[in-house]
Image (cartoon, helix red, strand yellow):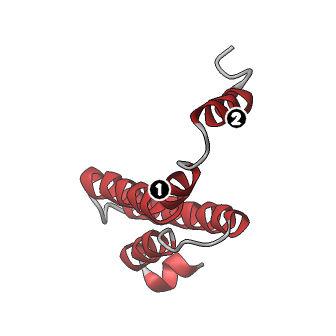
């Protein structure tokens, strides 16, 4: 249990930093799943133990989301901007069909 040896501050910082690199999509998803779990655990421990106020917990989650978007998803959005809009919108519709029903 890395949280016991690192503490929630170091564990949250490591999760946020790991969310930044730009790698393949499979590696990206694996990294984001693991670091999201690490961060959630660190935030839960810090919150339950009274080590962090609510603002710090929310801040860590927000920082992680920002790092993930900046490091992994925004670069992919830029490269997919060369895809014609008609193709991108049909891809979006097929990926999201059946949601919200």
Taking the spot 49% from the left edge, 86% from the top edge, the residue there is 5
Q: CA distance from mark 1 to mark 2?
A: 18 Å
Furthest-top residue in view? Answer: 101
**Which one is earlier in the sequence, the residue at label 1 or at label 2?**
1
Placement of the C terminus among the 4 image quadrants: top right
Taking the spot 25% from the left edge, 52% from the top edge, the residue there is 55
Furthest-bottom residue in view? Answer: 5
Above or below residue 6? Residue 47 is: above
Dots 1 and 2: beta carbons under 8 Å?
no
> On the picture, is 85 further left or further right than 5?
right
Q: Pick the residue in front: 97 or 40.
A: 97
> On the picture, is 17 further left or further right than 83?
left
Q: Give the structural element (helix, strand or loop) at label 1.
A: helix
Placement of the N terminus among the 4 image quadrants: bottom right
Where residue 94 sits, quadrant-wise, is top right
Where residue 98 sits, quadrant-wise, is top right
Q: Residues within 10 Å of mark 2 (few under 14, many from 20)?
A: few
Q: Pick the residue in front: 8 or 21.
A: 21
Picture coordinates of residue 4, whole percent (x, y): 50, 80
Taking the spot 59% from the left edge, 63% from the top edge, the residue there is 32
Residue identifier under label 2? 91
Taking the spot 55% from the left edge, 57% from the top edge, the residue there is 79
């Amino acid at each position: 249990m890395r949280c016991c040896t690192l503490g929630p501050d170091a564990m949250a910082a490591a999760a946020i930093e790991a969310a930044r690199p730009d790698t393949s999509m499979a590696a990206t998803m694996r990294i984001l799943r693991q670091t999201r779990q690490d961060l959630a655990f660190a935030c839960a421990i810090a919150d339950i133990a009274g080590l962090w106020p609510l603002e710090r917990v929310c801040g860590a989650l927000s920082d992680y989301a920002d790092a993930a978007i900046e490091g992994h998803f925004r670069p992919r959005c830029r490269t997919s901007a060369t895809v014609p809009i008609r193709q991108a919108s049909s891809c979006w519709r097929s990926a999201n069909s059946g949601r919200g029903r």
